[in-house]
Image: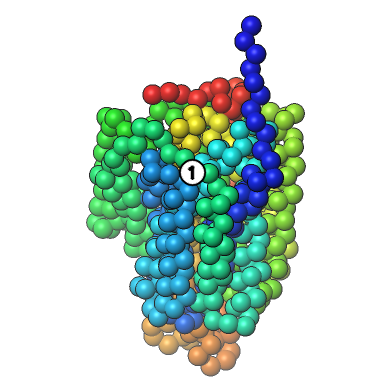
């Protein structure tokens, strides 16, 4: 009888290394959450239109989603530590560029550079964690801690960003990443192991281009559809995205060394976890964008006060993540994930009751975040466990692509929906007596409030109230859209129950 040797357990050095890996996780999330708070101040300074605002917000997410798979493959082939250091350098350069951006175009370009750097950080970090923690229990806890670093970034972002915006200009929110990245670059060579696959092959350059252009074309078409209706531009962009996606999938099926390893999706745990990550990203990122703007521009809170009101959401996610990490050894992961999605349904219910007080808004956000945390805390571990070690970078890249693509889609799709609902509602409720041309200022709430401040009273106050009411109506519509997404998530998860509940590595596929 063969006696299996238990995997080696991690020691002090490995846990210190995990702390270092938490730095990019905090910064990647903080880079998104601080911008939610900075958007009103930034909009007043650079005066972007509605489409430019959405690009400022989601070009980062789309660059991350578009290059994650490429970066995962590069890490598997040429070394994850090396890629981690390169990503930190690129992210730092983009942050400095964004801090001193003088116009909307430069800021969008800087955010895109940040996204490329961030795309190298996440899959490399997860692949290194897979190498550091061989023991399944320790690995599950390490991944949970790493996910908590993301949540910490979400919690610290509003607080740090609110404090910086209180004393400095909006550009300061980007500079907070610079010293942390310097620490990462200095410590990584001494603490993190280097590893790359033995069968390193050339990167599929055409696949890289297709993986980037596919989501970008689809989302651009959705934005144009939301802004202008069903135009030739919107239809052509959507059609191009579909065609590019089909070409990409067919190319990956035929490739000897595919950029996107489609065989991993034969494992139900992998497929359900990645699909769930997309839905979770859509819900959480799309809601966070609306929440931050509502607290500042509808309720009139300062950035720091708005950040404090968002703190309970992050705290609830942290508590639930630690709780489910311990429960996962005794309770089926599928049950925890599905039950969480059901709990999250209380979020949209509360959001439909949002008025001029923060309680329903914050309560709805807390329920959403707490309910979806089990999927975030357990899903990443299931994805890594479903893939063989030599494809850890590719698997983690696909997992992070799902989350980041979902986040970018949440901002683009739900943001576009909110802009469309806001514009139509405001057009129906504009106060009488406005001078010609005023309806054009209803593209964004920030633009309308700025214009209202230039009008004589009581006309300016009436316009501002109409705009705030229109935005509130958009929150209610937003909640109605979230509900079916959560129902879908709760219903699909049990379909892969056996694979989700089984040994995480037992379902791995081979090529």
Q: Which residue is mark 1?
A: 194
Please say if 42 is above or below 412.
Answer: below
Q: Against 468, is 215 above or below?
A: above
- Identify the element where label 1 is drawn: loop
Left or right position of 221 against 435:
left
- In the rendered structure, the answer to whether residue 37 lies left or right of residue 53 reads right
Q: How many marks?
A: 1
Furthest residue toward top: 1
Q: Position of residue 141 (x, y in %)?
A: 68, 40
Q: Nearer the viewer, residue 268 or 126?
A: 126
- In the image, residue 343 lies at what x, y percent? 69, 43
Front residue (pair 498, 145): 145
What scheme was used to colour the molecule?
A: rainbow
Q: Is residue 327 above or below residue 14?
A: above
Q: Position of residue 492 (x, y in %)?
A: 55, 32
- Tell me which residue sits at (38%, 59%) in the image: 223
* Quarter of the C terminus within the rendering: top left
Which residue occupies 39% across, 63% down? 113
For residue 143, side relative to residue 437 (left or right) = right
Residue 363 visible: no
Residue sitting at x 37%, y 67%: 109
Q: Residue at x 58, y 89 (%)?
A: 458
Res 143 quadrant in image: top right
- Assess disc 1: are there few (<14), some (14-19) or many (≥20) residues with their C-alpha within 10 Å of its C-alpha: some
One can see residue 389 in this view? yes
């Amino acid at each position: 009888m063969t006696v299996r040797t238990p995997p080696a357990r991690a020691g002090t050095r490995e846990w210190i290394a995990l702390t270092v890996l938490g730095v990019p996780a905090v910064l990647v999330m903080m880079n998104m959450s601080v911008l939610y708070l900075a958007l009103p101040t930034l909009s007043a300074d650079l005066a972007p239109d509605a489409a430019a605002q959405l690009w400022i917000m989601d070009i980062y997410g789309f660059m991350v989603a578009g290059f994650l798979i490429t970066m995962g493959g590069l890490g598997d082939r040429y070394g994850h530590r090396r890629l981690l250091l390169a990503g930190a350098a690129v992210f730092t350069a983009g942050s400095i560029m964004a801090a001193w951006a003088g116009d909307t175009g430069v800021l969008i370009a800087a955010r895109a550079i940040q996204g490329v750097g961030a795309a190298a950080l996440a899959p490399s970090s997860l692949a290194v964690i897979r190498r550091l923690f061989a023991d399944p229990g320790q690995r599950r806890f390490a991944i949970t801690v790493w996910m908590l670093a993301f949540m910490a970034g979400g919690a610290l972002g509003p607080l740090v960003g609110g404090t910086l915006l209180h004393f400095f200009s909006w550009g300061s929110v980007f500079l907070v990443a610079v010293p942390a990245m310097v620490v990462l670059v200095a410590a990584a060579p001494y603490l993190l192991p280097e590893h790359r696959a033995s069968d390193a092959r050339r990167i599929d350059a055409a696949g890289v281009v297709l993986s980037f252009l596919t989501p970008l074309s689809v989302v651009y078409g959705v934005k144009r559809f939301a802004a202008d209706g069903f135009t030739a531009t919107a239809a052509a962009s959507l059609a191009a995205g579909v065609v590019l996606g089909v070409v990409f999938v067919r190319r990956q099926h035929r490739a000897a060394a595919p950029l996107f390893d489609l065989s991993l999706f034969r494992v139900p745990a992998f497929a359900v976890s990645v699909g769930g990550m997309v839905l979770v990203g859509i819900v959480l990122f799309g809601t966070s964008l609306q929440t931050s703007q509502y607290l500042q521009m509808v309720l009139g809170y300062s950035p720091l006060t708005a950040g404090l009101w968002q703190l309970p959401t992050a705290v609830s996610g942290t508590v639930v993540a630690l709780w489910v990490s311990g429960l996962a050894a005794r309770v089926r992961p599928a049950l925890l994930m599905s039950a969480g999605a059901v709990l999250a349904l209380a979020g949209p219910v509360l959001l439909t009751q949002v008025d001029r007080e923060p309680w329903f808004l914050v309560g709805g956000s807390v329920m959403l975040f707490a309910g979806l945390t089990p999927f975030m805390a357990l899903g990443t571990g299931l994805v890594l466990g479903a893939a063989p070690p030599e494809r850890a970078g590719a698997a983690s890249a696909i997992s992070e692509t799902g989350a980041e693509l979902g986040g970018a889609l949440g901002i683009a799709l739900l943001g576009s929906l909110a802009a469309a609902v806001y514009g139509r509602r405001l057009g129906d409720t504009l106060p009488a007596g406005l001078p010609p041309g005023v309806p054009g200022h209803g593209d964004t709430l920030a633009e309308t409030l700025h214009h209202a401040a230039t009008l004589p009273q009581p006309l300016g106050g009436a316009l501002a109230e109409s705009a705030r009411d229109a935005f509130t109506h958009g929150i209610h519509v937003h909640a109605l859209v979230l509900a079916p997404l959560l129902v879908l998530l709760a219903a699909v998860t049990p379909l892969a129950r056996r694979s989700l509940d089984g040994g995480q590595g037992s379902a791995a596929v081979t090529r």
